[in-house]
Image: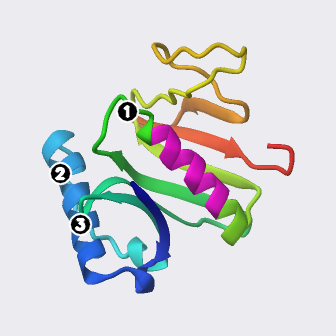
């Protein structure tokens, strides 16, 4: 798997096609969410993804939402049960902090979104239950099926 972070203008036509294809596969086909996906936000976003055999296997987009906040959305993985989502989030947070800098990262997610870390805070190595990663907080968001995850980014995180 090769990880990448690119602005819209840096994406190749193949990458754009594969991003839109994977988003349609997950959000429209799998999750039955009915909305127009190309919403114009892609133009101002960083696109963070992994390719495997010329296909997107993990993806998210991130953009500035105010002066010191980055908003993450359209998060997906097509490989399940292998820690790909955790790898995606760790890579994204690291790259966003390095390239953009911010005090806070927020993320919209469908209800039932959990972080499954490879190692819990207490030092165990369990992946069979949702767990809290240091500085990652899951809390309800105004809406029926949406949750907001706030990731406070600081020099100590």
Q: Is residue 97 above or below residue 104?
A: below
At 45% from the left edge and 34% from the top edge, which residue is drawn? Answer: 83
Q: Earlier in the sequence, mark 1 or mark 3?
A: 3
- Residue 69 place in picture, x, y as percent: 68, 60
- Residue 38 place in picture, x, y as percent: 27, 70
Q: Categorize mark 3 by other alpha carbons within 10 Å: few (<14), some (14-19), many (20+).
A: some
Viewport quadrant of the C terminus: top right
Q: Which residue is mark 1?
A: 144
Q: Are marks 1 and 2 in contact (CB under 8 Å)?
A: no
What whole-number distance in Å separates the C-alpha atoms at marks 3 and 2? Answer: 10 Å
Q: Which residue is mark 3?
A: 18
Q: Are marks 1 and 3 in contact (CB under 8 Å)?
A: no
Residue 73 picture quarter? bottom left
Magenta run includes residue 92: yes
State the mark number for residue 25: 2
Which one is in front in this view, the residue at disc 1 or the one at disc 3? 3
Residue 20 picture quarter? bottom left
SS state under label 3: helix
What whole-number distance in Å separates the C-alpha atoms at marks 1 and 3? Answer: 30 Å
User: Magenta residues, as a range?
Assistant: 85-95
Magenta run includes residue 139: no
Q: Categorize mark 1 by other alpha carbons within 10 Å: few (<14), some (14-19), many (20+).
A: few
What whole-number distance in Å separates the C-alpha atoms at marks 1 and 2? Answer: 23 Å
Task: Single out the residue that lies furthest toward the right.
Answer: 156
Q: Judge left or right: residue 85 versus residue 104.
A: left
Q: Is residue 142 visible?
A: no
- Residue 102 place in picture, x, y as percent: 73, 62
């Amino acid at each position: 798997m090769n990880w990448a972070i690119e602005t819209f203008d840096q994406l190749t036509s193949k990458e754009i096609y594969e991003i839109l294809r994977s988003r349609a596969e997950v959000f429209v086909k799998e999750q039955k969410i009915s909305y127009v996906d190309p919403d114009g936000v892609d133009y101002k976003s960083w696109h963070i993804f992994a390719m495997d055999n010329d296909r997107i296997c993990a993806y998210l987009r991130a953009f500035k939402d105010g002066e010191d906040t980055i908003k993450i959305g359209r998060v997906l993985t097509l490989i399940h049960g292998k820690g790909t989502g955790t790898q995606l989030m760790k890579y994204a947070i690291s790259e966003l902090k390095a390239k953009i800098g911010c005090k806070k990262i927020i993320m919209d997610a469908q209800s039932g979104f959990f972080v499954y870390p490879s190692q819990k805070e207490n030092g165990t190595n369990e992946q069979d239950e949702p767990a809290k990663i240091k500085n990652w907080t899951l809390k309800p968001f105004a809406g029926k099926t949406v949750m907001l995850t706030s990731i406070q980014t600081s020099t100590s995180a």
